[in-house]
Amino acid sequence: MTDNRDGIKLFLQYLQIEKNYSPYTVEYYQGDLLEFSLFMSEQTIAKWDEVEYQDVRLYLTKLFEQKLARKSVARKISSLRSFYKFLVREMLVVYNPFAQVSIPKIEKRLPEFFYEEELVALFEACDEAEPIGQRNRAILELLYATGIRVSESCSIRLKDIDMELSTLLVHGKGRKDRYVPFGSFAHEALERYISYGRREILTKNKKEHDYLLVNFRGGPLTPRGLRTVLNSIIEKSSLNGQIHPHKLRHSFATHLLNNGADMRTVQELLGHANLSSTQIYTHVTNDYLKKTYMAHHPRA
């Protein structure tokens, strides 16, 4: 049996190389595994193969005692279940003690999205006279035009963009590539940023690489950096609250469905493996339709 740290190291390598998970996702898995490893130490459990079902139940009780959200508990259990499944596959343990643990039901919340007038306020908050403002406008237009994930946007290289056909090659989860079209607004913003803003940022910092999105120092923009950029944009706008990349992704899907796009097309554009992942947006659009009906029908 390998050392506990070796087991975690092997699993994280598996997630990065075989599963092609983003650094952000791998970081979450690592945190969950280290936390459980600490619990094992508290229970004087030395090795992964010494963990039994009753230990898992005790750990689950401890998580609920910490008053964690059900979503957080579900994620931790899911991480550990996947980890043990990997250990069984590699014949490092005999069985998976998490296999029979039921993940607590998560309360389904409707995805938040921006209304079109809110998006206009965001776009107008970007000062396109400055290179950073051109980059920020390009980020907003790109995320809203394509609905891509934050990890996918940060991995885009110039060679992935076909300006002539207005399409983007997206490297999705599990090494699944897909082509996503983008419209005239995103085309114009990308062209301006690539030709002027990006070039100026790289030249000023004496950097040279082919990643599309760059930080103010000229290096490739990270998912964490992108979130910071989006929050800085909303602070300059007339909107309140926080913004996150998935809210733009949700807006992309919701607005497509509201305007008559079919579910299968939206599924393909989002890169969802299962249609069930896309179907949550029908609840949003149904809510939107009801509000529109109540507001405008004379006998509502």
Image (cartoon, rainbow, N blue to C red):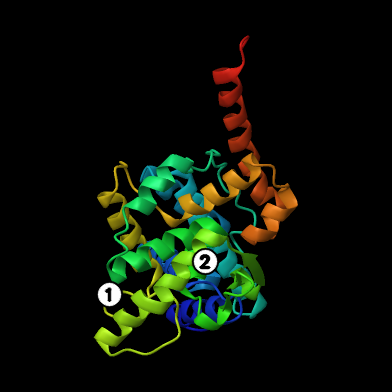
Residue drawn where x is 65% and y is 43% of the image: 257
Give the SS element for disc 2. Answer: helix
Left or right of 272? Residue 252 is left
Q: Quadrant of residue 269?
A: bottom right
Q: Quadrant of the C terminus?
A: top right
Q: Which mark is residue 150?
A: none
Q: Quadrant of the N terminus?
A: bottom right
In the current view of this chain or complex, which residue is farthest to the top? Answer: 299
Give the SS element for disc 1. Answer: loop
Q: Is residue 272 visible?
A: no
Q: Which residue is mark 1?
A: 216
Residue drawn where x is 64% and y is 80% of the image: 91
Going from the N terminus, do you reach mark 2 or mark 1 first? 2
Residue 23 position (above or below residue 110): below
Q: Foreground residue, 281 or 194?
A: 194
Q: Which mark is residue 187?
A: 2
Q: Position of residue 157 (x, y in %)?
A: 50, 80
Residue 178 position (above or below residue 255): below
Residue drawn where x is 62% and y is 70% of the image: 167
Q: Amino acid at mark 1?
A: Phe
Q: Is residue 204 visible?
A: yes
- Per the model, the C-alpha gap separating discs 2 and 1 is 22 Å
Q: Amino acid at mark 2?
A: His
Left or right of 291? Residue 273 is right
Q: Position of residue 75 (x, y in %)?
A: 50, 55
